[in-house]
Image (tube, helix red, strand yellow):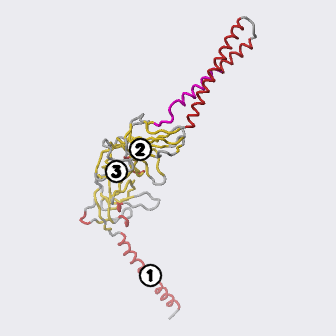
Amino acid sequence: MNKKTVIGVTMAIVIAIVVFILFAREKPAEVAGSDEHQAKLVEITAVEPGKVERVSELSGALEAGEETAVAFEVSGRILEMRYKEGDRVNAGTILARVDATEYSLQLTRARTGVEKAQVGYQQALDHFDRMKQLNEAGAISQLDFENAQNRLKVAEEDLAEASQALGLLEQDKAVLTAPISGTVLAKMADQGQVTGAGTPVYKIGQISTLKTILPVPDHEITAWKPGQTVVLELYNQERQAQVTRVFPATNRGTGTIGVEVSVPNPDHDWFPGQIVLAGRAEIKDGIYVPAGAVINRGEEKPYVFLVFEGKASKRAVTIGELFGDKLEVTSGLNPDEMLVVKGAEKLFEGDDVEVPGGNGR
């Protein structure tokens, strides 16, 4: 075999090997390509507006509609405590008395001070009258007359201050009276006990109307408005209550906002301190989809897949609240669009899809 023949045979073998390799690589690619274009099986449903009911179940402790702590203005030993918890009193009713020995001494000193101030004022007035006559006759200097005027002015001020102090003390501070009509909620001292000025001995409340503060989750607070009706329940007894105030700040520890509600209590058969349950139902209109239909991955905006003419179409959406297994979609979807509810996680934009029963549009 000559040299040209050997070269020719070698080239033929190389070409055959290259062709074989290329053919072997092309076949799997074609098979793979056919798999990529295979339609993916999904389930769909038509987007429809709907309604959900949100029920708020909260609890709170009842409080008196109005209450005040009552204390003596002077210190002393309590001589009498006339009322106990649960008693009803009217504004001005005498509640208690105290032996205010120190107060009596202060009152005596104040009266003595007024008497001295009155004597001083009369002396200054008599002196001024004499100096005025002498001044008119030109018998004294202008400076002497002005000194007499100043002395009278100081005496007038001293008398006014002493009289004011006596007037305050002459109010019977040894007697404690009810500032409001209501019910004695707490008796905080006993007869014979020494009490200090300003230390509460009674707490009085008006319980014809009670109130409670409900801890509402901050994401629900926009649904609560003053004037709305809330149902309160206590031992299977229900009453209509009304929202009176929504507090302006969130409790950082609980993430809730206080909502104050008031409830009538004409028979005084509900009491401060009892725990009531509060229920409030709200019907909310919107578009609600199965939670599994919405894909939310990392920083990417939530999205869904819709089906148009047998192909998957990716659509960004804005989501709201979760109600059970339904997720609120506030924007991005329109009624009657065909939404993928199963199989969305394996889809890409433009994928061919197959729907059981062929209900894809």
CA–CA distance in space, label 1 to label 3: 78 Å
Are circles 2 and 3 on residues that touch, CB within 8 Å?
A: no
Front residue of 340/209: it is 209
- Quickly name the residue at label 1: 21
Q: Secondary structure at mark 3?
A: strand
Q: Residue 33: x, y in percent?
A: 38, 72
Q: Residue 268 placed where, x, y %?
A: 33, 44
Residue 208, relative to residue 117: is it above or below?
below
122 left or right of 305 in image:
right
Q: Which mark is residue 246?
A: 2
Question: Are dots 1 and 3 in contact, CB under 8 Å?
Answer: no
Lower position in the chain sequence, tag 1 or tag 3? 1
Q: Disc 1 on helix, strand or loop?
A: helix
The residue mark sitting in front, 2 or 1, is 2
- Front disc: 2 or 3: 3
Whether residue 239 is situated above or below residue 139 in the rendered picture: below
Write the residue at 68% across / 13% down: 128
For badge 1, the amino acid type reads Ile
| 95 or 293, nearer to the observer | 95
Q: Position of residue 174 (x, y in %)?
A: 50, 36
Instruction: Please tell me whether mark 2 sits on a helix, a strand or a loop.
Output: strand
**Position above or below: 230 against 147:** below
* Extreme-left residue of the structure: 357
Q: Is residue 3 left or right of residue 242?
A: right
Q: Which mark is residue 351?
A: none
Start and end of the magenta stretch? 155-176
What's the amino acid at mark 2? Val
Tell us which disc is closer to us: 1 or 3. 3
Q: Which mark is residue 278?
A: 3
* Image quarter (top left, top right, bottom left or bottom right) of the C terminus: bottom left
